[in-house]
Image: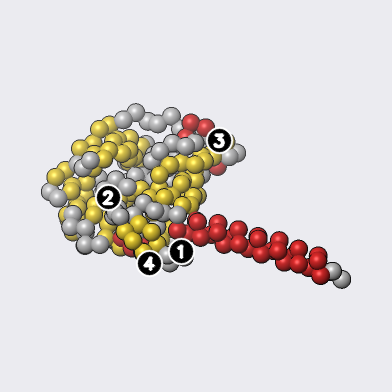
Amino acid sequence: MLSKERLRKTLRDWTATLVMIGVLLTFRSALADWYDVPTGSMQPTILVGERVVVNKLAYGLKIPFTRTRVTSWGEPERGDVVTFPSPANGQRLVKRVVAVGGDVVAMRDGILSLNGNLLAYRREAAPDWPLRPDDTLSHGWFREALPGHEHPVMTTDQQPRLRDWGPVTVPAGHVLVLGDNRDNSADGRVFGFVPSELIEGRAEAVALSLDRDRWWKPRWGRFGSGL
């Protein structure tokens, strides 16, 4: 049977542990977190098996464990990589904002048009990280020039999907998101616009990068790389 002193010590230890857990959960809910990326929909920017650091204070401060914003100091911008629950099924997703409220967007043969202007694309060499062993398709590598922001994208000629759609107008208070792996991404072309209030934060950097197909081999050159 526990003595009173032992019981008090046990209660203190458990209380301290619970407080620490509560602080950690609150921090992750309201300030910053890191997420595992299980799919290749954001390749070549984010690879399968990477963990990305998400800044949950990028656009404002929310009450922990809610979507209620206490104060706001910004909105998602074109080019931001953001995390949010899918409007289709609630699954957490990581995608890139390509259009904001009021923008008119269309795609023709994989080329984005924003407010009537075709985006510029510059062909690039294939990246130095290996593709998945079961990926035998032919890919194209480009830099897409959103207004004020360039970023990499990849295409897959053998399985084109959703390369022609729109034009659509993004409603106020919403964003349109796409995956950088344009022919292998279920994104805004599938589930529609994302309300800005659903945006959890902005992905800032790759924390860890492990190649799941090669015995979790570290991709050292990608540790700490910005997005």
Looking at the rendered structure, the secondary structure element under dot 4 is loop
Judging depth in this view, the residue of 181 and 157 nearest the camera is 181
Instruction: Give the quarter of the figure containing the N terminus.
Output: bottom right
Q: Are marks 3 and 1 in contact (CB under 8 Å)?
A: no
Report how far apart the C-alphas of labels 1 and 4 lie in the structure.
8 Å
Report how far apart the C-alphas of labels 2 and 1 lie in the structure.
23 Å
Residue under numbered circle 4: 68
Question: Mark 2: which amino acid?
Answer: Glu
Of callouts 3 and 4, which one flags the residue occurring earlier in the amino acid sequence?
Answer: 4
Looking at the rendered structure, the secondary structure element under dot 1 is loop
| Mark nearer the viewer, 3 or 1 | 1
Of callouts 2 and 1, which one flags the residue occurring earlier in the amino acid sequence?
Answer: 1
Horizontally, is 19 left or right of 93 in the view?
right
Question: Mark 1: which amino acid?
Answer: Pro
Disc sitting over residue 77 in the figure: 2
| Mark nearer the viewer, 2 or 1 | 1
| Mark nearer the viewer, 4 or 2 | 4
Vertical arrangement, residue 24 with respect to residue 7, above or below: above
Of callouts 4 and 2, which one flags the residue occurring earlier in the amino acid sequence?
Answer: 4
Residue under numbered circle 1: 64
Looking at the rendered structure, the secondary structure element under dot 2 is loop
